[in-house]
Image (cartoon, grey):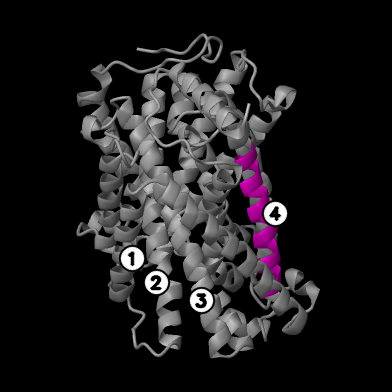
Amino acid sequence: MDIRDETAAEAASDEAELARFGYKQELNRSLGLFSSFAVAFSYISPSTGIFTLFALGLTTIGGVFIWSWPIVAVGQLCIALGFAELASHYPVAGSVFQWTKYLSGKTYSWFAGWIYLFAGILTVCAVCVTLPLALIPAFNNMGWNVQNTLHNQRIFAIVTLILITILNIFGVKLVAIINNTGVLFEILGMVVFAFVLALFHHHQSASVVFHTGGTSLTTGTFLVAMFMSLFVIYGFDTAGTLAEETRDPRREAPKAIIGSIVGAFIIGGIFLFAMLLAIPNLKDGIKGGFGPAQIIDANFGNAFSTVFLLVVSAAIFVCCLSIMTSTVRLCFGMSRDNALPASKQLSWVHPKLHTPVGSCIAIGLLAFIPMLQYAGAGIIAIAATGMIYLAYFIGNIALMRARLRGWPKAAAPFSLGRWGIPLNVLALAWGGGMLINFAWPRAATNPRPSELPGTLDFHWAWLNHKPVFWTVVIVIALVGAVYFMLVQRTKPAHVEAPEGEVPPAVTVS
């Protein structure tokens, strides 16, 4: 059998596997292991999150904030391992929604999917509005005269949103080519910049990771400083979301999920350490709110600083692209199960492009809405990240309940075996603790609109005095509850899976 015959046989096997779950192969199954890894890695995108919130960590507890990086990575790895096992059992588009559907039934999975869908939409918006923070200074270094105002940031973000929507419409293969190239540049760029800084521009000793620079180190301030790491290390489940476009997804998706989080931890950790070493004066850096751009600018001339900003901009752009790709697949997966308004239009797949065009347009339009009340990238990023952690926590509750009922009964290429329950307990403890951290009302991470005069205004005095994250979660949950009770509750559920894949206590109607 030659390579073409093997490829055809593999594709037929993957399509037959999908048919066992009650779905027809409509999306283009063209992603290999590296492409699957690259999409998940670019969703995590260490350079994006570090660029956005490095200053928050530094100004809060100085160089000590780097210790949040391994803590968050270990906590998220506990979640990722469970999700990798789920991806190996349920290789269908929709990740948390699909997994909870097979583990806990219709109502629970619908709310899990609803929360995760809007978490993804907010994340698309958050990363789109992050791009101008790197791109506008890069343009100004090249002689442009663009003021870095909230208005101009919003214009750049809208253009970015339109571009990534169009690219997603034209197919996952095009997205993968751009994404693979962008990930290679991001990895090489971060490593090269890190080594140049560490070797030739190290103003701080290695002990900078133990120095607070005069800030106050307490449990509370450390929890605030964690937000940079929290904003970076998530989205690894994207490899599972793209299962229907991945070859041999039961084996490859788990590898990509785990590989993306490990790769992001290593690359991001090297970059963070190098940035701390390169701060000319720690106390001045804290006082000035230095981020990576200011640190690079303090050590190099205009040309090198511009190259750095352009590399970061490219990384942020492919991050935008992959996050939208993931969110579109979740929207498609839910609408294909008739679980969303206008499901017929959202689930329609273009016969030539093999993409859900309606879902692409819908996600693009919904991601635009937060830009109408744009108060800066940090506010949207924190709301988006908190929503993601909530969706992950909901998914892990379903997984734990299923494990206690004896799941998994069927074999899969990736299995945690007897480590499943202990890791699930750690994942729930970690996720629950971080949800409290996100929900805690404080000006730095969960502000009230009244604490942001002239930027964020809900046009209701009572609501303006409530923490932003509370408002976002409650409004999305209430709208979902009303829609579910009035419309979705009476619709039949789609739960088809190979024998042994669904726990015996799941309600399917």
Q: Which residue is drawn at 65% across and 65% down?
A: 65
Query: Which residue position holds label 1?
Result: 157
Q: Which residue is drawn at 56% across and 33% down?
A: 4
Task: Answer whether residue 269 is magenta in the image.
Answer: yes
Q: How crowded is mark 4: few (under 14 residues within 10 Å), some or many (20 or more)?
A: some
> Given this view, does label 4 or label 2 mark the residue nearer the observer?
2
Residue type at mark 3?
A: Leu
On the rendered image, what quadrant is the N terminus found in? Answer: top right
Query: Looking at the picture, how far across and down is residue 254, in whole percent?
Result: 62, 35
Query: Which residue position holds label 4?
Result: 70
Is 279 placed left or right of 502 in the picture?
Answer: right
Task: Answer whether residue 173 is magenta in the image.
Answer: no
On the rendered image, what quadrant is the C terminus found in? Answer: top left
Q: Residues within 10 Å of mark 3 (few under 14, many from 20)?
A: many
Residue type at mark 4?
A: Pro
Quadrant location of residue 483? top left
Quadrant location of residue 10? top right
Query: Which residue position holds label 3?
Result: 309
What number is the disc on residue 132?
A: 2
Label 1 to label 3: alpha-carbon separation? 16 Å
Query: Looking at the picture, how far across and down is residue 227, in whole percent?
Result: 55, 58
Query: Looking at the picture, how far across and down is residue 244, in whole percent?
Result: 46, 32
Circle 1/circle 2 CB separation < 8 Å: yes
| Mark sitting earlier along the chain (4/2) | 4
Residue type at mark 2?
A: Pro
Residue type at mark 1?
A: Ala
